Amino acid sequence: ADAMFISLSKKYIYSITVPAKLQSYMACGKPVLSMIDGETSAIINEADAGLTSSAGDFKKLAENALKMSKMEKRQLVKLGENSRKYYLNHFNKSNLIDVLENTLHSLSKTNT
């Protein structure tokens, strides 16, 4: 696939959720096309990993799908590279464990 799709309903709980499929898509170095709010949209934008529209905004989704379909292969590859880079820096297991250990260590220092 040239790009991967994520969509969730317009509900508060989904705006604070990061679906596991986003991490999978990014781990595979794929560009992301989404119709989603909150954290997931913010991650895609921060990573410059694809195009996003608000949950339920099917018109913007259609615009983004057309825009992505007209991108040159090198543009899609770049979005995929950005996606993979973000995954490696933020979602890979060893980094997450390091962050967790550092957080727990700093919490233990403030509680002593």
Image (cartoon, grey):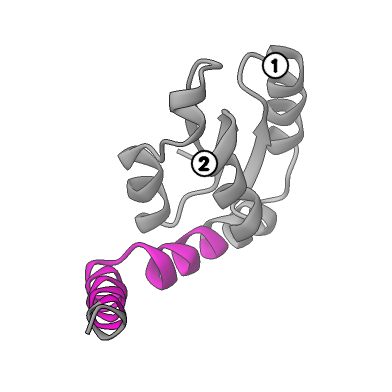
Answer whether residue 73 is visible to the viewer in this image. Answer: yes
The residue at 31%/81% (across/down) is: 110
Q: State whether residue 45 is above or below residue 91.
A: above
- Residue 6, can we see it? no
Identify residue type, mark 1. Asp
Which residue shows up at 25% across the image and 78% down it?
Answer: 111
Number of residues whose C-alpha sits closer than 10 Å to that of mark 2, classed few (under 14), some (14–19) or many (20 or more): many
Determine the main secondary structure of the stretch shown in magenta.
Answer: helix
Find out whether residue 102 is within the magenta segment: yes
Residue that carries the numbered disc 2 in the rendered image: 40
Which quarter of the figure has residue 99? Answer: bottom left
| Residue type pointed to by label 2 | Thr
Label tally: 2
Quadrant where the N terminus is found in the figure: top left
Q: Residue 111, labelled with which disc? A: none
Within 10 Å of disc 1 (Cα), the crowding (few <14, some 14-19, many 20+) is: few
Residue 25 spot, x, y in % from top left? 39, 46
The answer to whether 102 is drawn above or below residue 54 in the figure is below
Q: Which residues are magenta?
A: 81-107
Q: What secondary structure is found at the residue carrying circle 1?
A: loop
| Residue in view at x 47 percent, y 50 percent | 30
Image location (x, y in percent) of residue 43: 55, 51
Report the residue marked by disc 1: 57
Q: From the viewer's perspective, is residue 73 above or below residue 55?
A: below
Gap in Å between the C-alphas at discs 1 and 2? 15 Å
Image quarter hosting the C terminus: bottom left
Q: Quadrant of residue 63?
A: top right
